[in-house]
Amino acid sequence: MLAKLKQFFESPNQTLSAQEQAHHLNLAAASLLLEVVMADETMSDEEAKILPELLTTTLGLSVNDVGALIQDATVSQSNSTSLFEFTQAINDNFDIEQKQQLILAMWRLAYADGHLCQYEDQMIRRTSELLYLRHSELIQMRNLAIETQQTP
């Protein structure tokens, strides 16, 4: 699986089926979400609970697909050497709204346990920069995540 992902990132001109390309993009997005979860080196119960929900809403996945994607993304994220391998695929295929939704999901994950760790904050800010989002968009997504967290 990891070899296929690396092959996808290294040779984007290779002909992939739409299903394979969608899986690779979902894997990249899920791996970025896991980077936030693991920024403080632990996955809280709140983060574990909200992650599948965020994957279904942000990426439009079915509940059945989420479990396997999380397992694949865990392997991919733990073997990655940088965020660039994930953000490159996102930049090549996501529009601005999709990138914003991904950053919003990252903020929601970061705030899921009730506090923002400095490493989670740094991870999201770095990812936002690599996705070429403006600082104002980053802050807008953060504020939206805070508002939705406080809403019962």
Image: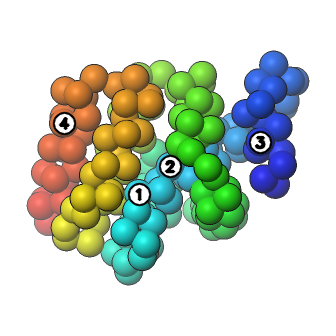
Image side of residue 143 versus residue 129, left or right = left
In percent of the image, x 32 and y 58: which residue is there?
119
Query: Can residue 20 be seen by looking at this rendering?
Result: no
Q: CA distance from mark 2 to mark 3?
A: 15 Å
Q: CA distance from mark 3 to mark 1?
A: 21 Å
Q: Determine crowd level at label 3: few under 14, some 14-19, many 20+ residues with C-alpha closer than 10 A.
A: some
Which residue reaches farthest bottom? 45
Three-letter code, disc 4: Ile
Residues at discs 1 and 2 in contact (Cβ within 8 Å): yes
Total labels drawn? 4
Residue designated by label 3: 6
Query: Residue 36 — which label?
Result: 1
First of labels 4, 2 by sequence position? 2
Depth check: give the residue in front, 44 or 9: 9
* Residue underneath mark 2: 32
Horizontal side, residue 82 vs residue 143: left or right: right
Element assignment for label 1: helix
Mark 4, residue position: 139
Dot placed on the residue nearer the N-terminal end, 2 or 3 = 3
